[in-house]
Image: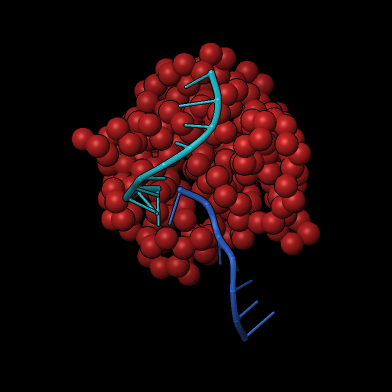
Chain colours: A red, B blue, C cyan
DNA sequence: GCGACAG
DNA sequence: ATCTTGTCGC
């Protein structure tokens, strides 16, 4: 698929924050996603503690969850890890990987936050805006506060930043820790929740994320 | 002001 | 993110 990078790469934390403030206005946190045929999972694996990394994208059939396309590319993180600016570590390699895809997925499922971010512009929003493809963030740990949801698959509670609802703590399987779902771009929170549940019929994390994770690890081992 | 803080 | 032992369950 083709990705339109519409901005210069920031060279400092201040520039990166300013870019997030600028791009956040392009985010559309609504939409119901009719006719989703394929879903992409995006993940990055790191070589030990270094900045060498592998970006992996796994595209699955939305119905059967079987693989239909994938891309795995090596890269290097140029930004230090700073919560809030996390996207700038993984973005370049993930964009490379997306560009090597033979197809254009109908939905992006990103390992990290979307709107649930100090400036409402997490990695999932950034990728959604750059691609114009609907995106959602599924994080393993929250950036905001939440009360534990009920114990059953499908139970959820709001994820809060102050008094603002920025996402949901969602139980994807009975008795497992919740995942943290937030809107990336061109979808509403109900739809995002519904998609994550559909993509996680058996395990805590969506099948898209798991597939991408496996691809990345396998590439690191070589 | 201080602490907490996606991967 | 990544590093680990043991343990539980299909």
Q: Residue at x 58, y 27 (%)?
A: A200
The answer to whether A150 appears left or right of A6 in the picture is right
- Residue A31: give x, y in percent of width and height: 70, 33
Most extreme residue toward the top is A64
In the picture, residue A151 is in which quadrant? Answer: top right
Most extreme residue toward the right is A163
- Residue A187: give x, y in percent of width and height: 66, 35
Pick the quarter of the image with the N terminus of chain A.
top left
Q: Is residue A84 above or below residue A186?
A: below
- Asked whether residue A207 appears in the rendered view, the answer is yes
- Residue A2: give x, y in percent of width and height: 41, 33
- Asked whether residue A192 appears in the rendered view, the answer is no
Q: Is residue A93 above or below residue A163?
A: above
Pick the quarter of the image with the C terminus of chain A.
top left
Q: Is residue A189 above or below residue A79?
A: above
Q: Residue at x 61, y 59 (%)?
A: A119
The answer to whether A169 appears left or right of A9 in the picture is right
Q: Is residue A148 above or below residue A33?
A: below
Q: Nearer the viewer, residue A29 or A144?
A: A144
In the picture, residue A129 is in which quadrant? Answer: top right
How many marks can you see? 0
The answer to whether A188 appears left or right of A212 in the picture is right
Q: Nearer the viewer, residue A151 or A162?
A: A151
Q: Residue at x 63, y 49 (%)?
A: A115
- Residue A46: give x, y in percent of width and height: 33, 47
């Amino acid at each position: 698929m083709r990705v339109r990078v519409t901005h210069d790469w920031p060279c400092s934390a201040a520039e990166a924050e300013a870019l997030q403030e600028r791009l956040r206005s392009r985010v559309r946190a609504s939409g119901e996603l009719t006719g989703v045929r394929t879903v992409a999972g995006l993940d990055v694996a790191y070589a030990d503690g270094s900045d060498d990394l592998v970006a992996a994208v796994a595209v699955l059939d939305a119905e059967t969850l079987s693989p239909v396309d994938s891309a795995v590319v090596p890269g290097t993180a140029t930004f230090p890890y700073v919560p809030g600016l996390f996207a700038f570590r993984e973005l370049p390699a993930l964009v490379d990987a997306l560009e090597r895809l033979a197809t254009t997925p109908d939905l992006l499922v990103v390992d990290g936050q979307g709107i649930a971010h100090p400036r409402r512009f997490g990695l999932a929003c950034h990728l959604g805006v750059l691609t114009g493809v609907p995106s959602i963030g599924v994080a393993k740990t929250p950036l905001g506060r939440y009360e534990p949801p009920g114990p059953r698959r499908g139970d959820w509670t709001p994820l809060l930043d102050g008094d603002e609802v920025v996402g949901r703590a969602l139980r994807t399987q009975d008795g497992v820790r919740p995942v943290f779902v937030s809107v990336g771009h061109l979808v509403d929170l109900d739809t995002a929740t519904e998609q994550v549940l559909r993509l996680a019929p058996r395990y805590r994390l969506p099948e898209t994320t798991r597939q991408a994770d496996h691809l990345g690890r396998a590439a690191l081992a070589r």
